[in-house]
Image (cartoon, rainbow, N blue to C red):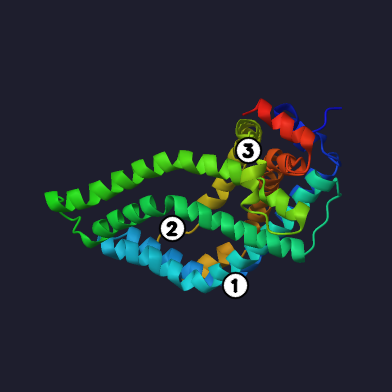
Amino acid sequence: MPNGFSFDRALTYPFKAPHFGSFPWIFGLSYAGIYVALFTAVGLLGWRTAADWFLTLQALENDPNPAPDEVFGVIFGGLGTLIPLLLVVSVLGWVVWAMFEVASQKRYLFGEKFSLGFGGDELRMMIVGLLWGLMSLAIFALPLLLMVSAFGVLIASDLNGPMDDETARQFLGPFFGGFGLMFLLFFVYVFVATRLSPCFGLTVKAREIRFFDAWTVSRGRFWPILGAYVIILIVVSVASQMVSMLAQLVMMPLMMNLPSGEVTGDEVAAIFLSPAFLIPMALIYFVLLFVQGLTQHFVGAPASLAARHDPRNDLGETERVDIFS
């Protein structure tokens, strides 16, 4: 059996690492179960605000000539009332992500069976995840600012009549400039993300935060890591899309039963909180989140294998990476 890092091994590692017969499936089921429970709790806590927002949007749809600032005000105003709850959910989601990422890395690095916990490994993983988010934000900050400024011009303008040349220039310039810059920076992001991708495995392996060390570990391994990642992602994405389409077919009758015309908040709540709506929706999202959990676990294998075979600690790996340079 081949040892060390190679493209072939990175590609097949999700299926050849220990405990394939049990780990991924328990991982996916646990992932889906915890997130469905989290989302259900959020829905029960925020249903009144969501129902009021739904009714406001419905009233806006009946307005033949809504003002643009009124539309954006309703949309973002409804989100504003949910911000405290969304912040709590974001923190909990961050914690849960770290727990599952650590469990995933421990299978690939040490061959451990599936288990969830919260301790030093998970805290370090949360910090690495935060650094990853800041890195992503830094790369895309400029195009995002340009597009936000473009939509700011759109909100402030009067769209009931034709857009004047100056407003069009102020909108189109930042919008297409931001869009084009985001497209170009996407390739920068792919390069940087691939080079830093072993940081999650290195942090678990060393039991210390090893974010920037990943750049050294991925030296000479860029194309094998990226190639294996893309192929695995394509395979799981095809499966995910098939499951998603089936879920949407099941959801259509539920959506058709939503109220139309003049309804009250209590009537909306009665539908959203009824077992006939909640149980099918929970089952649908359980399946979707199960696939999402499998995706998170499988696509992390190539970078984790690179972290496991750190060339800085293995002279054989130091020679092997020159093949890819």
What secondary structure is marked by label 3?
A: loop
Mark 3 vs 2, N-terminal side? 3
What secondary structure is marked by label 2?
A: loop
Decide which of 60, 303 is in the foreground and name it. 303
Q: Is residue 251 above or below residue 73?
A: above
Q: Which quarter shows the C terminus? A: top right
Residue 182 image position (x, y, % from top left): 40, 44
- Which residue is disc 2 drawn over? 260
Mark 1 vs 3, N-terminal side? 1
Question: Which one is closest to the eye, mark 1 or mark 3?
Answer: 3
Q: CA distance from mark 3 to mark 2?
A: 58 Å
Numbered badge on residue 45? 1
Decide which of 211, 118 is in the foreground and name it. 211
Q: Which quarter shows the N terminus? A: top right
Give, as a three-letter code, the residue at label 1: Leu
- Please give left or right for residue 171 compared with residue 71 in the image: left
Neighbourhood count class around disc 2 (C-alpha, 10 Å): few under 14, some 14–19, many 20 upward: few
Give, as a three-letter code, the residue at label 2: Ser
Residue 66 image position (x, y, % from top left): 26, 60
Numbered badge on residue 219? 3
Q: CA distance from mark 1 to mark 2?
A: 24 Å
Q: Quadrant of residue 25?
A: top right
